[in-house]
Image (tube, rainbow, N blue to C red):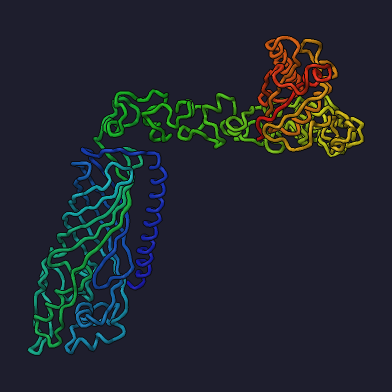
Amino acid sequence: MMRTLPHIVISGRGLMRSALLLGTLLLMSAFATAQKVTYGWNPQGMLVFGADGGITKYFGEFTDQNFGGVGQGHVKFFILPELGIQLNGGMGNYVYNRRLRDEFKDVYTRQFFRDPRLVGLTEFPEDDFSTYADDPAMRTPVMETDKLWFVEGRVIVNLFPSRWFNPYFSTGVGLMRYENSNANRKVDGTPLLNVAFGRKPFTVDTPDGVVTRTSTLPADANTLPVIPVGLGFDILITETVALNADISYRFLIGEGNDMMDGLGKVVQENFNTAGRVDRTKSTENPDSWASFTVGFQIYLFGHSDRDGDGLTDTREESIGTDPLNPDTDGDGLNDADEIQIYGTDALKTDTDDDRLTDAEEVAKKTDPRNADTDGDGLTEGEEFAHGTDPFDTDSDKDGLTDGDEVHKWHSDPLRTDSDADGLPDTDEVLVHHSDPRSRDSDGDGIEDAREVELRTDPAATDSDGDGLSDGDEILKYNTDPLKSDSDGDGRSDGDEIAAGADPFLGDSDGDGIADGSDECPGEPETRNGYRDEDGCPDAEPLTTEPLTHDMTLVLEGVEFDQASATLTPDAKNALQSAIQTLRDNPGVSVEIGGHTDSRGSAESNRELSTLRAEAVKTFLVTEGIDPSRLSVRGYGESRPRASNANAEGRALNRRIELTVQSND
C-alpha cells in the first residue's frame, strides 16, 4: 500500500493542474468567441443541459492543499430571466493527507492504531494511548483518496441575464454519499477502524476490564444531506452554446458529517462512553468540501427565429429589430451579421455616417463602424467621391494627407502638383507657403515655379517690399525684385517710380540733390533762394511771417485781360507765390477778394471783381489747393487803395487780395 501513495499524490496534483489549464483554455476561447455576440438576450423558458469537470477540495481535520477530481452533469430551467432552477449530480474523489496533530493525538491513535502504515498494533492496547501517540511512527503522513457521489437541487439567481457574460449565485439542498477507504479495510481480519459505520461492535479496555461497545454510526451515516452554496458565470458563445464555470461549497448535515476522513467527534464520544481513563474533550467540527468545475451548456427550446437571420425573435424584440425582416435597416446586411460579425447598428443603414451603407463598406472592406478607416481626415464617402484610397492616408504620395489636401489646402489628393506649375503640392504648402491650386499664388504676374527660380517669394506680391510687384519689377521696370533700392540712392524703387524718378539714377532730375534726399526727385530744384535744399521746384511765398486771423496779403502782378476775368500768363506766374504760401500753411483758410477801379457802374464792377476772384480760386484748385480752404468775394470799387483820378491809382485799385479767415 505504501508503494501506491506517490502515485495518488501525483494524480491529485496533476488533476488539479490539468483542470486549471483546461479551464483557462476554455475561458480564453469563450471570451475570444463571445466578443462577436452583443446581447440583449432573454433565457426565460429555456431548458439547459450541461456537462462539467473540475477539481474538489476537502475541508476537515486534515485540511491541506491536495485536490481530487469530479465530473458532473446538470439541467437548468429558467422561470424568469433572473431566476432559474437546477438539478445537478456527479461523482468524484477527495484527496487529503491524514496525519497526527497534537490537538487530537489520543483520539487519532485510538482510531488508527491498527494501520500498518503507522505503529501497526494488532490488538487493543491496555495502557494509556498517549504512549503510542508519542511514538514518531504514529506521525507518519498517509495520503488518502476517497470517493463521493452527490445530487443537488438549486435555485439560481442571474445577475446579468441579458448579457453575454452572466454571473450568478446559487443555493439549495442535496444528498451526498462518501466512501472512506478505511471503513472497509481490514488488517489480519480485523476492521482497520475501531469505530466505523453500521453500528458495529468494538472493544475498549477499561479499569473494569475489556468492554464491548457498539458504534453509534448507522450504516447509512455516510449518506448525508448537504447545503450547497455556489457562485459562477455563463459565457455565451452563441445563443445556444455557453461556457459555464462554477465554484461551490457544501455544508454536511447529519451524524456522519464529521467522518469523511474516518476521524471525528463520534470517535471521541464512543471511547469516552466506554469508560476509559484517558478521556478527551471533543474539538472537531463537521467536515465539508468544495468544487470548481468548467464545462459547456446547450440551451434548448428557446426562442424562434421566424425571419431566419440568426437572431431569435426574443432577441430581436429586445434590441428593436424586426423579427419578420432579416435586414431591418435595409442596408444589405442581415441583422445577425451586423450584430454578431460586423458590430454595426442593425437599425441604421450607415452606422458611421460616412455616406456609405454598411453593406457597401463590407464589400469594399472598409470599417463600417469607423467613418475614416485610414484616419486621414476624409470619411469613406468622401474618399470614394474624390477617388482616393480609403486604406492609404496619402493617395498621391506627395507628403500631404488626403484629408488635409481636400479640407485644408483644397488641392487635388490624386495629383502631386495640383496646379501643374512645376512645384509639388508639398513644397508649395510646407516650404513656400504658396497656393497649390494657383500657378501664380500671389497674382504678381510671375508663376510660382519661376519665382522659386528667381528666388522671389511666390506667396508675396512684393518680395523686397519696395512698393512694386515682382511682376512689374521683372516685366515692366527691369528692376531687381530682391532689392528695394536698385540704384542705392536711399529711395526705394517704388517711391522713385511713383515720384517720376529713375530707379537706376541717383539724381534723376539732375538738380544736384540725390533722389534719397530729394523731395521731388522727378523735378529739378528751383534755385531762387527759398528752400533750395529740398529738391522741389517752388516760388517765394507772399510772406515768411506767421499768418494770423484777418491778415491781408495783396497778390502783386495778377492781371486780367481788359474788362474780363481771364488770367494772363503773367498772372498765373504771379499766383505761384500765393500757391507756395498756401502749401507752406496747410491749416490756413483764406478769402479771395476781388477789387476794381471806379470806371463803370458799381454793380458791374462788383460782378467783375467776383468773377476775377472765382478765376483765381479755379486756378489755385487746379494747382492742388483744397477748395474747402478757399472762399470768394467780389468787392468791386468799394475798397480803393488809391485815388481813381489818375492811372496810377486805378492800377493799384485793380487787385486780388488773400485775407486769412482761420489757421488750424
Q: Measuring from the top left, give residue 317's x and y in whole percent.
A: 27, 31
Quadrant location of the C terminus in the rendered image:
top right
Against 119, residue 479 (above or below) is: above
On-image quarter of the N terminus: bottom left
Q: Residue at x 46, y 32 (%)?
A: 368
| Figure label count | 0
Report whether 210 appears left or right of 152. Answer: left
Q: Is residue 470 visible?
A: no
Query: Which residue is situated farthest in the left direction here?
Result: 208
Q: Is residue 538 above or below residue 197?
A: above
In the picture provided, is 304 more to the left or to the right than 511?
left
Quick check: can you spot residue 143? yes
Locate residue 312: give its quadrant.
top left
Q: In which quarter of the image is residue 611?
A: top right
- Residue 225: which quarter of the image? bottom left
Please name the residue shown 21% across and 62% down the image: 178
> Looking at the image, which is closer to me, 163 or 357?
357
Vertical placement of 37 versus 22: above or below? above
Q: Position of residue 436 (x, y in %)?
A: 68, 29
> Foreground: 328 or 68?
328
Q: Position of residue 540 (x, y in %)?
A: 83, 31
Q: Where is residue 409 in the image (x, y as percent from the top left)?
A: 62, 31
Residue 551 horizontal side relative to residue 50, left or right: right
Q: Nearer the viewer, residue 154 or 429?
A: 429
Instruction: Please name the residue shown 22% across and 39% down the image.
Output: 44
Residue sitting at the far front = 645
